[in-house]
Image (cartoon, rainbow, N blue to C red):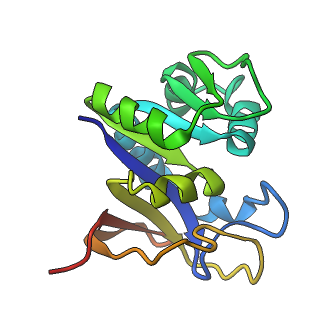
Amino acid sequence: MGKLIMWNLVSLDGMFEGATPWALDWFQRGFDEAAIAHVLEQLRATDALVFGRRTYEGMFQHWHEATGEIAEFMNTLPKVVFSRTLAASDWQNTRMVAEDPADVIADLKARTRGDIYVFGSAELSASLMHADLFDEYRLGLTPVVLGCGTQLFGELAAPRELALIEARPINPSLLLLRYARGGVG
């Protein structure tokens, strides 16, 4: 069975993007060779990528013509995009889905062996959290306080208890935090 993993970079004040959509310049301070090696390690274990519409649009814009090893993974891995407004995609190996995300993801997890990553996609992630479908939360904590922006978790329908399974620095500007669902104890 596949494992659904949320992967996002966050600021110290819990933002995953700045004051405007795709205000991500603060991400760059954590991206050196060690961070790139970590991203590639994750992508090698990935069977599918999942996006909401807005994240898909930004990812497509950035990756579809990019080159390099990360771009190769991003462009060739199977992608599932949840959107009620987009019916087709020009991005290689992308399936557009208008159905209930919880049902589709539960089925994808049952048919997949490797990891399934959700990048960005705060609204989609909230619905998947509500359905208790995430097996792991991976956060790259960056030492910056944005002061405003989009909170990763926003308002949750109910509190979630998580258990820390790993905390380690990737580099001086990126701390990896891995959490599993379920509390300590």
Q: Is residue 178 above or below residue 146?
A: above
Kindly tell me whether residue 40 is visible in this rendering. no
Q: How many marks on residues?
A: 0
User: The N terminus appears in which quarter of the rendering?
Assistant: top left
State the residue at coordinates (14%, 81%): 185
State the residue at coordinates (76%, 68%): 18
State the residue at coordinates (50%, 46%): 118
Instruction: Tell me residue 13's x, y (percent).
Output: 62, 82
The one nearer the camera, 170 or 102, is: 102
Which residue ends up furthest to the left in the rendered image?
A: 185
Instruction: Tell me residue 46's x, y (percent).
Output: 37, 34
Left or right of 87 on screen, residue 109? left
Instruction: Tell me residue 81's x, y (percent).
Output: 62, 32
The one nearer the camera, 180 or 20, is: 180
The one nearer the camera, 145 or 92, is: 92
Kindly tell me whether residue 150 is visible in this rendering. yes
Which residue ends up furthest to the right in the rendered image?
A: 20
State the residue at coordinates (75%, 36%): 57
Instruction: Tell me residue 11's x, y (percent).
Output: 60, 74
Q: Is residue 173 above or below residue 133?
A: below
Q: Is residue 38 above or below residue 65?
A: below
Q: Quadrant of residue 94?
A: top right
Q: Quadrant of residue 150?
A: bottom right
Left or right of 57 on screen, residue 177? left
